[in-house]
Image (cartoon, helix red, strand yellow):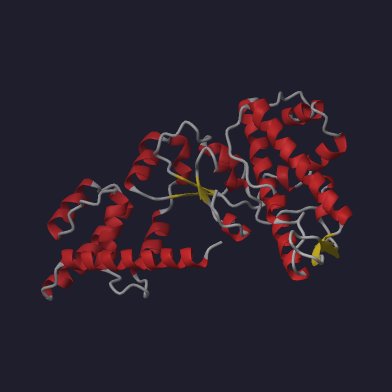
Amino acid sequence: MPERTSVRDQRQPVWWSRAYGWRSFYPLSPSFIAYSFRDLCYQPSIVETSVHLPNMAQPERRFKMRGDDMEWWQSCEAYLVRAAWILRTKYAISAHSPPVPSSFGFTRAHKSSSVAQKMITLSRDWFGIWMGFISFLIAKTEVVTPTPKDQIKPGWYTVMQADGFSEAWLSGLQSSTVCTFSSDSPRAGIVLELSRNDSSRPEIAWFAELDIPMWFVWTRHEEEFLSLYANGLRFLIPPSALIQDALTLIFKNPCSTLPKLPLAALVFRRYVRDDNLPIDRDAVKVLKMSNVTSDTYSFVADFFLEQAGDLDKDGASQGDLLASYLAAHSEEEQRKADAATSVGP
């Protein structure tokens, strides 16, 4: 799990992994109006309290959530943790749990009212994260043990009811954001490598049926996989016009100091997944012939060859330009990484 605690960091689509693929189910606009989450709907009161600290003669003034509100939040957290444990164990679902909301401080006393308010807000946000986690587990139960068509209640509902959960709490969960798998409840989404054989990854159709947004890197391997071997997934192939518009926008990027030839060569390497790809004009012509069915390759090749011709007239080296671009790109990425590290969570 990323060390950053801001929910903004959880709103981005994530690469599929067995441990954290559930993050793709995070609801971007979680609603707490259902019965199971009703105590999270309103702003809890913050009260002043005294804390006796070690080696301090006088008690220190602190601020914390009002006792009744805190108990309700703790009860909601306990229900979610228990529900997740039951679903994971009963259906043998592999996934790492997120940190519990209380770990972000809604149960603690703080030095100021503003800090207490900040930690309460952060803790509430992490209830939304847990809603996404439970959503994923419930969706997976239908993969492990599909509910019979003649059964009114879903299988997970019956399992949890038999384990002591009340009808009211389960009905509230079923009517909440947790079980709303549609465009009415947008979620963070998943990044997939379609051509990679990953036994831990659910079927692509499963994400589509649940309205989980999907992204994938468009490479030669993905294009061949969808075109030749995955007949049922050909609808995922992006239209040629969309690819050309995206590439044209990239090549016209004003932020790059070398926005044309080097960037086209870099796209070649990423698309083919070969860092040793030749970048001279003759090699690209041959490669273009071998990838004649690919609209992506043809478009990038035409762009590359056009710019390469202009550079040849000026005596510029294509290899040197690409090397300069890659070096500058690497330095910029390192600078961003250093800046992110210095900011901290």
Residue found 89% across the figure and 53% down from its top:
68
Please provide percent x and percent y for residue 268.
Answer: 27, 55
Give the camera-side residue of 141 and 186: 141
Residue found 39% across the figure and 39% down from its top:
195
The answer, for residue 184, to whether it is visible in the render is no
Residue found 73% across the figure and 48% down from its top:
177
Residue found 67% across the figure and 44% down from its top:
181
Please provide percent x and percent y for residue 143.
Answer: 61, 30
The number of callouts visible is 0
Q: Quadrant of residue 228?
A: top left
**In the image, is residue 63 above or below residue 293?**
below
**In the image, is residue 138 above or below residue 296?**
above
Quadrant of the frame with the C terminus: bottom right
Give the camera-side residue of 307 and 23: 23
Q: Quadrant of residue 282?
A: bottom left
Please provide percent x and percent y for residue 163.
Answer: 79, 27
Image position of 272 (left or right of 344) = left
The answer, for residue 132, to whether it is visible in the render is yes
Please provide percent x and percent y for residue 65.
Answer: 82, 59
Image position of 1 (left or right of 268) = right
Image position of 236 (left or right of 305) = right
